[in-house]
Image (cartoon, rainbow, N blue to C red):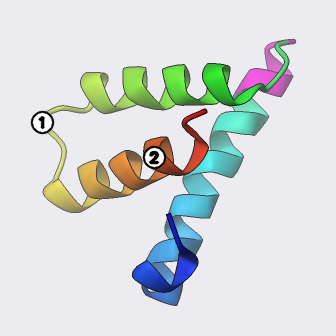
Amino acid sequence: MKRDVLSEEYYDEVCRVVGDAVIVLTESGHDTPREMLATLLKQTRLKRGDSDREEQRVLEHAIRLVKP
């Protein structure tokens, strides 16, 4: 995914989500390989299936960004 595809504000939100995932995994004593990040983001997307469409789009972009 190229950065210029997303607005700067949207890109920042996607990066925040990825950063939050890294922090959660690190605090839990896990390493943060791309596969682990993608798995955590996918699980989050499934658990928040009823959340607003914008949040789902941010999670989907984040998954594509870190997917190996």
Q: x, y percentage for residue 48? A: 26, 32
**Spatial CA span between label 2 and label 1:** 20 Å
Label 2: state its secondary structure: helix
Q: Is residue 46 left or right of residue 20?
A: left
Report the predominant secondary structure element of the magenta stretch.
helix
Residue at the top extreme, as displayed:
29
- Give the camera-side residue of 33 and 55: 33
Q: Residues within 10 Å of mark 1 (few under 14, many from 20)?
A: few
Q: Is residue 2 above or below residue 30?
A: below
Tell me what residue is drawn at x 28 percent, y 22 percent.
Answer: 47
- Residue 15 magenta-highlighted: no
Q: Is residue 7 left or right of residue 3?
A: left
The quadrant holding residue 7 is bottom left
Q: Amino acid at mark 1?
A: Asp
Q: Residues within 10 Å of mark 2 (few under 14, many from 20)?
A: few
Magenta residues, as a range? 25-29
Q: Nearer the viewer, mark 2 or mark 1?
A: 2
Q: Amino acid at mark 2?
A: Arg
Specify whether residue 15 is in view. Answer: yes
The quadrant holding residue 49 is top left
Which residue, given by chain and number where applicable, does mark 1 sit on? 50
Q: Is residue 66 above or below residue 42?
A: below
Image quarter hosting the C terminus: top right
- Give the camera-side residue of 39 and 51: 39
Q: x, y percentage for residue 63? A: 46, 41
Tell me what residue is drawn at x 62 percent, y 29 percent.
Answer: 37
Which residue, given by chain and number where applicable, does mark 2 sit on? 64
